[in-house]
Image: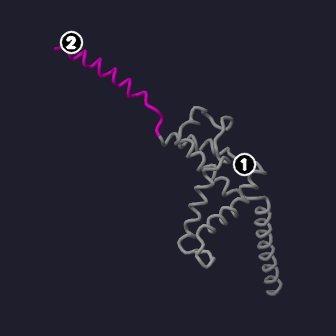
């Protein structure tokens, strides 16, 4: 009996060695992809063409859904455009992970990794601002501060 129990325990321990050697889970692969995509940045030329393609996508989308009179039907289709644009932009080669920009090149063949990388890189590019945006915001803040200082000065002069 003791031999059978020992033999069974040895076999079970060998089975547990197999279960410890599992692949990475999808969540950890997504975390790696997001960490790699945080370093992603489109160059100026591609960023310009990416931003200009928004108008072309919008024209192509709404051209397909024109009514018989020639006027665009905006109703429900207007809400569908953002999903359409997102799916078209995500499939572009702009957001494809390259071997020089990733931490583990073996993950380039993993569809979960590539999908998560493209999603995060697309989000970073969509939320990217130009230098003019920051200049405009700084000008608005400066103008607001000047108005507050001027208002405080006028109130202090009027109270004397």
Please give the label number shown on residue 3: 2
Q: Residues within 10 Å of mark 2 (few under 14, many from 20)?
A: few
With 108 as the anchor, is 59 left or right in this view?
right
According to the picture, the residue beneath numbered tag 1 turns out to be 42
Q: Are marks 2 and 1 in contact (CB under 8 Å)?
A: no
Residues shaded magenta: 1-25
x and y percentages locating residue 44 in the rendered image? 78, 51
x and y percentages locating residue 72 in the rendered image? 61, 74
Dot in front, 2 or 1: 1
**Quadrant of res 85:** bottom right
With 22 as the anchor, is 147 left or right in this view?
right
Pick whichever, 148 or 18, lies toward us. 18
Q: Which residue occupies 67% across, 38% down?
A: 101
Residue 6 covered by magenta stretch: yes
**Quadrant of res 71:** bottom right
On screen, 110 above or below 123? above
x and y percentages locating residue 27 in the rendered image? 48, 43
Disc 2 element: helix
x and y percentages locating residue 134 in the rendered image? 77, 61
Q: Locate the C terminus and report the quarter of the image it occupies.
A: bottom right
Q: Which residue occupies 61% across, 79% down?
A: 69
- Marked residue nearer the N-terminal end (2 or 1): 2
Residue 21 covered by magenta stretch: yes
Q: Which residue occupies 33% across, 23% down?
A: 15
On screen, 66 above or below 13? below
- Kindly give the residue lying farthest to the top in the view shown: 3
On screen, 16 above or below 140? above
Q: Main secondary structure of the magenta part?
A: helix
Whole-number angstrom distance, CA of label 2 to CA of label 1: 66 Å
With 65 as the anchor, is 8 left or right in this view?
left
- Kindly give the residue lying farthest to the front in the view shown: 68
Q: Residues within 10 Å of mark 1 (few under 14, many from 20)?
A: some
């Amino acid at each position: 009996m003791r031999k059978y129990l020992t033999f069974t325990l040895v076999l079970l321990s060998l089975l547990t060695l197999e279960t410890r050697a599992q692949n990475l889970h999808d969540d950890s692969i997504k975390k790696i992809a997001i960490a790699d995509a945080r370093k992603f940045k489109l160059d100026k030329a591609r960023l310009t063409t990416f931003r200009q393609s928004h108008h072309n996508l919008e024209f192509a989308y709404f051209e397909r859904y024109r009514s018989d009179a020639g006027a665009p039907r905006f109703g429900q289709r207007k809400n569908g455009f953002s999903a359409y644009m997102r799916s078209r932009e995500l499939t572009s080669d702009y957001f494809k992970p390259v071997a020089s920009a990733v931490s583990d090149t073996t993950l380039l063949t993993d569809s979960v990794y590539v999908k998560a990388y493209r999603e995060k890189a697309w989000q970073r590019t969509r939320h990217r601002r130009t230098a003019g945006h920051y200049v405009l915001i700084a000008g608005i803040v400066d103008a607001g501060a000047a108005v507050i200082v001027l208002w405080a000065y006028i109130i202090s002069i009027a109270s004397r």
